Image (spheres, rainbow, N blue to C red):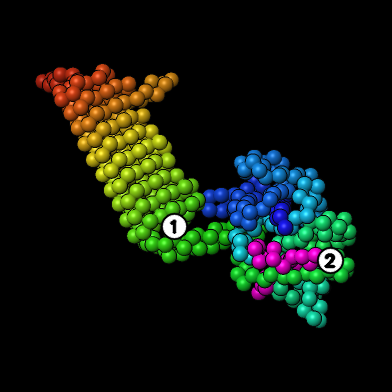
Amino acid sequence: MAVSIIILAAGQGTRMRSTLPKVLHRLAGRPLLSHVITKARQLNPDQIIIVYGHGGETVPKAISEKDIIWVQQELQLGTGHAVAQALPYINQNSMILVLYGDVPLVGVETLQELLTVVGERRVGLVTVELSNPTGYGRIIRDKSGEVAKIVEEADANAAQREVREVNTGIMAIESHYLEQIIPKISNNNAQGEYYLTDTIEQTIIEGGRVTTVSVSDSIEVMGVNDRKQLAHLERTYQAREVTRLMQEGISFSDPERFDLRGELKAGQDIYIDVNVILEGQVVLGDNVKIGPNCYIRDTVLEAGVEVFANCVIEGAIVDTQARIGPFARIRPETVLSEKTHIGNFVEIKKSAIGKNSKINHLSYIGDATVGKEVNVGAGTITCNYDGANKHHTIIEDNAFIGSDTQLIAPVKIGVGATIGAGSTITRDTPPGELTLSRSSQQTRPKWKRPTKDKRN
């Protein structure tokens, strides 16, 4: 049977104390809802329907995936009402899986097992036992151990509140059966809402059966209701990721001081120091070393690359055995070839740097093509912006750029050319020649430095 997934994402999340819809708060750099969508896609569903409400179009605009069916719940009348809004859009004769946009760490294996227990007049429900079940609906079983009903805490009596097995809200049910039951639930409860969990009691009343799938790790089904819970899930997520990465061949100076906010493809024998953040799509080759306090986003570091402390690298491709930093910034659309050296307080933007070239100190290279075996001295800048347009600089193979040089783009430095220190280069320079521009040095005898008038 085909699977249709309904994700409930309409809640306001008042305890977050935020104008941002709760499901758009970020875990590991991505909205909570995005994590749930990723898990849903791993089940290969025929359709994903997301019910949104609080924040209006903010939620669908934040999620750019075009094959999702978005349904607005204009009035916040409970989870049962939210699912009712999605019913007109579901495929007939499908299996319905209900997920929540603020429960990001649910396991795919759990969901797969849940789908296997569903059948004719048989509903699947994920439950968990908690040492402190406060706030959750309790699973009430009959004498034979079968689920009899779910009682929300606001409606529970003292004995029922002692029950530790609770409802997670994650459930699976055949579409035609859900369509029969949803109209039968009422809002006769303390909150005046239509609870999706009331479908469980209605199933039992009609002679159906509820089969539970229990998870052993409560973190898998933990929702986010406030910022403390969000922070707890963040650390849990990062701990899981770093454990997986260590098993795959990465060493960490301190596993608790590393954040992965995206996807990492990595080789072996990689070393990562403290306070490193990897974001977006990152690829690390064998034997890469990353020093402390580095931020790397959407970047490929090939085998043997070494990144020293306090570097920022974004949208770059770095070839084998290159060295970067410390305190370097590599900006998007930069390509560093094999064995390049980019040193301290150097910024590279939208430039290609050739094999064995060195830019070691206090320089800015933007919108440039730098050849092989080039040496760029300290304080060199490519003046690529004229106030309206960006222009390109070309430095050909084996050129030597003296310190404190300004290259006024567009300009081309010829093969093997040498630029004298302190020069401002405004025209193309010939290959193999020394080019420089300097005013004459003067010394003025008997000149005295001004002094402050002591009478003032």
Give the numbered dot on residue 258.
Answer: 1
Quick check: 424 left or right of 77? left
- Name the residue nearer the viewer: 234 or 149: 149
Q: Residue at x 39, y 46 (%)?
A: 300
Q: Can you see residue 256?
A: no
**Residue 201 x %, y %:** 84, 67
Whole-percent x, y for residue 146 in the image:
78, 76
Instruction: Identify whether 268 is placed above or below 279.
Output: below
Closer to the N terminus: mark 1 or mark 2? 2
Q: Is residue 120 magenta?
A: yes
Residue that extends furthest to the left in the rendered view of this protein: 445
Q: Secondary structure at mark 1?
A: strand
Write down the region rendered in magenta: 111-138
- Please give left or right for residue 112 compared with residue 251 in the image: right
On screen, residue 295 above or below 396: below
Which residue is at 67% across, 71% downward?
A: 214
Residue on which the image places disc 2: 203
Marks 1 and 2 sit apart, C-alpha to C-alpha, by 47 Å
For the residue carrying disc 1, how many other residues have a C-alpha within 10 Å: few (<14), some (14-19), or many (20+)? many
Label 2: how many Cα within 10 Å (few below 14, some 14–19, many 20+) = many
Q: Amino acid at mark 1?
A: Phe
Query: Is residue 71 part of the magenta span, yes or no?
Result: no
- Quadrant hosting residue 357: top left
Mark 2 lies on a secondary structure that is: helix
Picture quarter with the N terminus: bottom right
Q: Of the residues tagged 1 and 2, which is closer to the observer?
A: 2
